[in-house]
Amino acid sequence: MGCFHWVNTILGNLKTSIDGNYHGFNFVKYAHRYLAEVQYRFNRRFDLASIFPRLIFAGTRTGPRTEAWLRLAED
């Protein structure tokens, strides 16, 4: 039964993270973006301290982008 406890914990955490951060989450429209974000965090879960500084660095080094350019990622 210990295995089911962890499955329940993982599913509960997933539901909480979706409900807590994305109140108006339209799954059909934005699922690929949300899952890409979760994948990014998961792949860097052992180096959490560096995520914020790296995002700040990338944000300050990147110039303005048009909406059309941002939507290229959806294709």
Image (cartoon, rainbow, N blue to C red):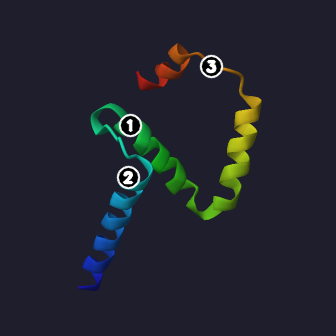
Q: Nearer the viewer, residue 66 or 40?
A: 66
Q: Is residue 1 left or right of residue 47?
A: left
Give the amino acid at mark 3. Arg
Label 3 sits on residue: 65
Mark 3 or mark 1, whichever is nearer to me: 3
- Contact, mark 2 vs mark 1 (Cβ under 8 Å): no
Picture coordinates of residue 42, whole percent (x, y): 50, 56
Give the amino acid at mark 2. Ile
Element carrying mark 2: helix
The structure residue drawn at horizontal position 37% and vertical position 35%, both measured from the top left corner, is 30
Label 1 sits on residue: 32
Picture coordinates of residue 22, whole percent (x, y): 41, 46
Picture coordinates of residue 39, whole percent (x, y): 47, 49
The structure residue drawn at horizontal position 70% and vertical position 55%, both measured from the top left corner, is 50
**Cα separation between marks 3 and 2:** 27 Å
Label 2 sits on residue: 18
**Cα separation between marks 2 and 1:** 14 Å
**Badge 2, how many Cα within 10 Å: few under 14, some, many 20+?**
some
Q: Earlier in the sequence, mark 3 or mark 2?
A: 2
